[in-house]
Amino acid sequence: MVGRKEFGALQKQAMSQGWIISRTKHGYKWTAPNGKSIFTGASPSDRRAIKNHVAYLKKLGFKEAA
């Protein structure tokens, strides 16, 4: 299972690229520097959660660290 540490690291990496992450009632709203947004769940609920989040974010311009 994916831990909250990995989820927190993803949030920090996104914020360093100019993303705004705000808490919603059921999860998070991720706003890209270009103004487009996506919504995700509040916790990494399965083993692919981080990979799925990264895939969603990449569609809006997120650049994953090597």
Image (cartoon, helix red, strand yellow):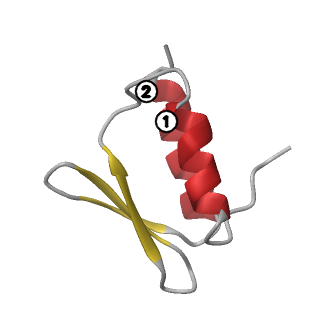
User: Callout 2: 10 Å neighbours few (<14), some, many (20+)?
Assistant: few
Image coordinates for residue 62, horizontal then vertical, percent: 67, 63
**Viewed as shown, does residue 19 lie left or right of 21?**
right
**Viewed as shown, does residue 25 lie left or right of 44?**
left
Image coordinates for residue 55, horizontal then vertical, percent: 63, 51
Label 2 residue SS? helix
What residue did someone put label 2 on? Answer: 4
**Viewed as shown, does residue 57 lie left or right of 29?**
right
Query: Which residue lies most toward the top here?
Result: 1
Q: Residue 7 carries which label?
A: 1
User: Callout 1: 10 Å neighbours few (<14), some, many (20+)?
Assistant: some
Foreground pick, 21 / 43:
43
Image coordinates for residue 1, horizontal then vertical, percent: 49, 13
Residue 58, placed above or below residue 33: above
**Residue beneath the point at 56% across and 57% down:** 56
Foreground pick, 66 / 60:
60
Residue 52: quadrant of the picture: top right
Q: Residue 23 carries which label?
A: none
**Residue beneath the point at 29% across and 41% down:** 42
Label 1 residue SS? helix
Q: What residue type is labelled 1?
A: Phe
The C terminus sits in image quarter: top right
CA gap, disc 1 and disc 2: 5 Å
Residue 21, placed above or below residue 41: below
Residue 39: quadrant of the picture: bottom left
Residue 41, placed above or below residue 1: below
> Would you say the residues marked 1 and 2 are in contact, meaning their CB atoms lie under 8 Å apart?
yes
